[in-house]
Amino acid sequence: MHDQAFAFTRRGLLGVGAALASLPLLEACGFKSGSKALVVGITEDPTTLTSAMTSAGYAQYLSPKIFDGLLGYGRDLRPYPRLAAAWHYNADDTALTLNLRPGVKWHDGAPFTSADVAWSALHIWKVYHSRGRMTYANLIAVDTPDPLTAVFRFSKPAPYVVSALAANESQVVPRHLYEGRDVLTNPANIKPVGTGPFRFAEWQRGQFIRFERNDDFWDKGKPHLDGIIFRVIGDGAAQAAALEAGEIHLSKLIPVGDYDRIEKLPDIRHDDRLYGLEVGGVGIEFNLDVPRLRDVRVRRAVAHAIDKDFILKTIYHGTGVIDDTPISSIYPAFHTDDVPRYPPDPAKAIALLDEAGLHPDANGVRLSFRLAPTPGGSISLQLAEYIHSALAKVGIDAKIESQDFATFVKRVYTDRDFDVAISGGQMGPDPVIGTHRFYWSKSFKPGVAFSNGAHYANPIVDAALESAASEVDPAKRRAFYATFQRQAMIDLPRIPLLTTSSGRLFYNTRVSPLPDTAEGLMGTFADVRLA
């Protein structure tokens, strides 16, 4: 991760608008004048451009433009063909056959085949990806009877896998560039070769990442853009100014305080849709290896000190839904309301701290810990500041530790050098794919990001999650997940806050609206147009 991100002030950006107009960013990035290249604001460099082995946010936003998905997903989360033209399960859901689209090529000209799918599933998704380790835990083999057929074989029924084959999730990488090389340090992770509508072209650290149109994309006539530039602008207010000045076309990182002004601009639209594959659950995760955080009364006190309604309305500007269980109400097939609840009640929080033997010192402080927000724009910091303030009222000193994304991931998930983290992640579309990793004891593995950072283990939870994963009867699955949710909310290793898209999407009127699918910014952008 690099810290050379642009740190323009709003006044500075607007002041240099005329100068930049004479030296357009497109030309500076290698595009001809008049090219239809979309410019998207990001706050910092991603750690990788390949999401096959990570669930890190920026990788999931950028890489689906380079790597097409085996399946796409409609607004209702139903799959439709992409690289897989057809698919079917066997009678007991222990084998999933994918019939691949013929004629697809990698960007280097090599043919895309079932060998690529098999190698990616067995050697990357199942091993390195925080959600993939759950999704493919029972995958025992991938048969490749011919170059266009891949048969996933499972030791137990796995009906949820067909919901996990999106471009950002189960991402197929070229076997010929990965086999025999270290997966995590492979140069192809940052100079990727994909199958998608755009090719990787250039990465100027701290400045921009440039993708170019793939003229050999299998979906003829697409993409409609000549390319995409992801421009690094490290401050939300500067992104707002850049959008206002026409320096970028699209951003989801505008500070809430700028919403009203930006919404009134005649050439700016906004999109508040919750895209099913893009939304994530935000929560407070406790490091249970820290002795002072092992007392459940402390964790419950923190929960009672926080007002989720305030968080949703004031910090997230109403974009999302409040979560009182590990499985959000936006996934009604799995959600239950029958769980212990912790409504905002500072007096109750103080009483719990007293019960835990944590009495105020001369400064009124009962407990201190470090609070690490996931880096990702102004909203994350505002949430941390609110939590700091709310906890101070009950005698808890939460010291905010801001850091770049790579440092956050390393400290929380590799070094285990943290107390409490504000962490987010996709929780769906099926709990096996998103939710299990935060609560299943076997998902704890130092070095795997966004996967049981709490180091939580409860045999009741493990049994419920493992039973639900292989159960094909919907009613029985729902019952197993109800048991899990109740126990998790008793133990409270993680306080669910809300499910959100992490901000309002603003875009220039020259940009066509995003397709009405489940993927949102995690889509391929093959259908996006620029007037």
Image (spheres, helix red, strand yellow):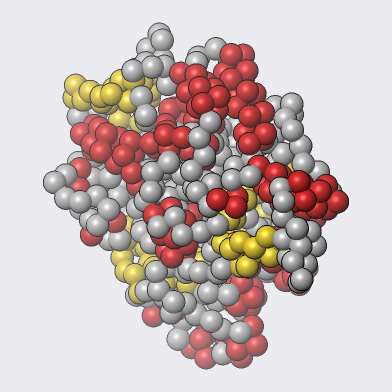
Q: Which residue is drawn at 37% across and 51% down?
A: 447
Q: Can residue 166 be seen in this view?
A: no
Q: Position of residue 322 (x, y in %)?
A: 73, 44
Q: Which residue is drawn at 55% across and 24% down?
A: 460
- Viewer-proximal residue among 13 and 396: 396
Q: How many marks?
A: 0
- On the picture, is 229 further left or further right than 201? right
- Viewer-proximal residue among 140 and 169: 140
Q: Return the residue found at the far left.
A: 180
- Viewer-proximal residue among 215 and 73: 73
Q: Position of residue 247 (x, y in %)?
A: 55, 76
Q: Residue at x 54, y 64 (%)?
A: 375
Q: Where is residue 46 in the image (x, y as percent from the top left)?
A: 42, 63
- On the picture, is 75 further left or further right than 457? right
**In the depicted structure, whether residue 459 falls above or below residue 56:** above
Q: Is residue 23 visible?
A: yes
Where the N terminus falls, by quadrant? bottom left
Where the C terminus falls, by quadrant? bottom right
- Viewer-proximal residue among 190 and 77: 190
Q: Name the image quarter holding residue 376.
A: bottom right
